[in-house]
Image (cartoon, rainbow, N blue to C red):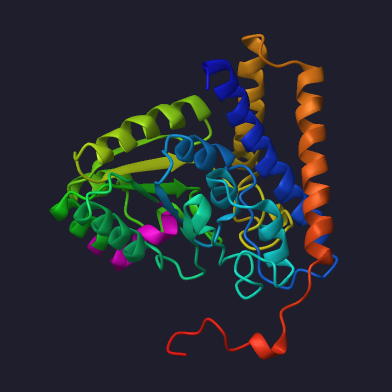
Amino acid sequence: MNATMDELDLFHQMLRIRRVEETLAERYAEQEMRCPMHLCIGQEATAVGVISALAEGDRVFSGHRAHGHYLATGGDLTAMIAELYGRASGCSQGRGGSMHLIDTDAGFMGSTAIVGGTVPVAVGAAWASQLRDEGRVVCLFFGDGCFEQGVLHESMNFAALHRLPILFVCENNHYAVYTPLEERQPTRPIHAIASAHGLHAQALDGNHLPAVRAAADKAVHGARIGDGPQFLELHTWRWREHCGPDVDDHLGYRTPEAQADWLARCPIEHAAAHLCSLGLLDEIGRQHIENAIQYEIEHAFDSALRAPLPRVQDMYGHLHGR
């Protein structure tokens, strides 16, 4: 893929994630999606920028805010929507909902509602890849709240000890539910602690797509050639409430000034402006992309809602030990 098409494709992917999430927010009030939902509106550049640096055969793991990672990896949109509606055709057969997505064919190995739950699994996958000499890189996404979980530090230590081919990606949106970072952690950079564990670590603006892609390219290459585990701290901001489709500015846990500043740093509009300045995107071209995305979303929702619900007799399938 040439550079022009690559930049347009990344913009398309970010806009697609945004429009999917906005549609989910609009339709959540219909009360047909009965699972909790954590939207990543505002954080699209972290998912697209990092995952676009991966190669076929690499693996991705995520946490509870996983829609963007799933879609950027190549997960099936219709299967994701069906999962949110609890349909048998869902990517987890209607059993998991928003926080338990999986598409192994695309290399998306799973997400979980348990903070830090996929961390040791991802490290195990990286260790297996190394032992089998597969040459694949594992990419693990988590939030700044996960940095307070002991399993993450144990896993970073193990990964550094064995020089595993893994990229740790901390999407630092500065809040764990309603609690700001400075009330949860001492004043020191998250990436500096990762560095102290022996990882190659850096921090950067997670809303700046070219910077994220460049840093991810370097980190993935380092992990693949045996330089050991890599760590990216990507500063970003979720626009909606922690869990749910709404805006919760009225709660007052984030200042209006901070909210306005981050909204002005929209990763999608910044990418669009950059493409326009290069003559790669105009109003007609953007509308064409918007139309294609809208058609895909409508088709995915229609297909998902026509799919059957799981059968009662299948309730006990896919359980450990059965």
Q: Residue at x 25, y 35 (%)?
A: 222
x and y percentages locating residue 245 in the rendered image: 73, 58
Residue nearest the viewer, comparing 93 with 258: 93
Q: Residue at x 15, y 54 (%)?
A: 162
Q: Where 215 falls versus 285 (above or below)?
A: below
x and y percentages locating residue 58 in the rendered image: 39, 46
In the figure, is residue 4 to the left or right of 291?
A: left
Q: Is residue 263 visible?
A: no
In the figure, is residue 18 to the left or right of 258?
A: right
Q: Residue at x 19, y 56 (%)?
A: 131
Whether residue 149 appears in magenta in the rendering, the answer is yes
Q: Is residue 22 visible?
A: yes
Q: Where 224 falls versus 96 (above or below)?
A: above
Residue 29 occupies quadrant: bottom right
x and y percentages locating residue 268 in the rendered image: 64, 31
Residue nearest the viewer, comparing 107 with 7: 107
x and y percentages locating residue 112 in the rendered image: 50, 67
Residue 233 occupies quadrant: top left
Residue found farthest to the left = 161
In the figure, is residue 189 to the left or right of 243?
A: left
Q: Where 73 falls versus 111 (above or below)?
A: above
In the figure, is residue 54 to the left or right of 238?
A: left
Instruction: Specify the principal SS of the magenta part.
Output: helix
The magenta stretch is 140-154
Whether residue 120 appears in magenta in the rendering, the answer is no
Q: Residue at x 67, y 27 (%)?
A: 269
